[in-house]
Image (tube, grey):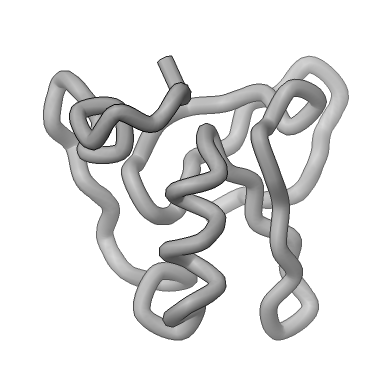
């Protein structure tokens, strides 16, 4: 999975599965030499609490990301 910043590329939020532009991401975290980007502060906080769980796991694929339904401002 590509979490690095590339010109004109999007990355996948490892917590909720949203495609996001790293330039406008709500946050980022480094874990084991990789940079991960997040659609919301809530997803960043969840990742930081358990990065091993979210860094390589399959992400949500629902139409509306779980972070959005929780009232976080990611959409």
On the rendered structure, is 64 left or right of 11? left
Q: Name the quadrant containing residue 23.
A: top right
Quarter-of-image position of residue 32: bottom right
Rendered residue at 71%/52% (across/down):
28
Q: Is residue 56 left or right of residue 23?
A: left
Figure check: 48 above or below 39? below
Q: Nearer the viewer, residue 40 or 59?
A: 40
Q: Residue furthest left?
A: 62
Q: Residue at x 59, y 36 (%)?
A: 11
Instruction: Spot the residue most to the right.
Output: 7
Q: How many marks?
A: 0
Say above or below: 68 vs 37: above
Relative to 38, 56 lies left or right: left
At 31% from the left and 38% from the top, the residue drawn is 67
Task: Please determine whether, in this image, residue 5 is positioned above or below residue 46.
Answer: above
Please provide percent x and percent y for residue 74. Answer: 46, 24
Across and down, in percent, residue 36 comes to 65, 56
Residue sitting nearer the eye, 44 or 70: 70
- Residue 40 at what x, y percent from top left? 52, 37
Quarter that holds the C terminus:
top left
- At 67% from the left and 23% from the top, the residue drawn is 21
Q: Is residue 36 left or right of residue 4?
A: left
Corner quadrant of residue 10 = top right
């Amino acid at each position: 999975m590509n979490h690095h910043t590339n010109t004109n590329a999007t990355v996948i939020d490892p917590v909720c599965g949203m495609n996001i532009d790293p330039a406008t991401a709500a946050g980022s975290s480094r874990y084991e030499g990789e940079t991960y980007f997040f659609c919301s502060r809530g997803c960043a906080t969840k990742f930081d609490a358990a990065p091993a769980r979210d860094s390589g796991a399959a992400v949500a694929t629902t139409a509306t990301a779980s972070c959005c339904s929780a009232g976080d401002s990611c959409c």
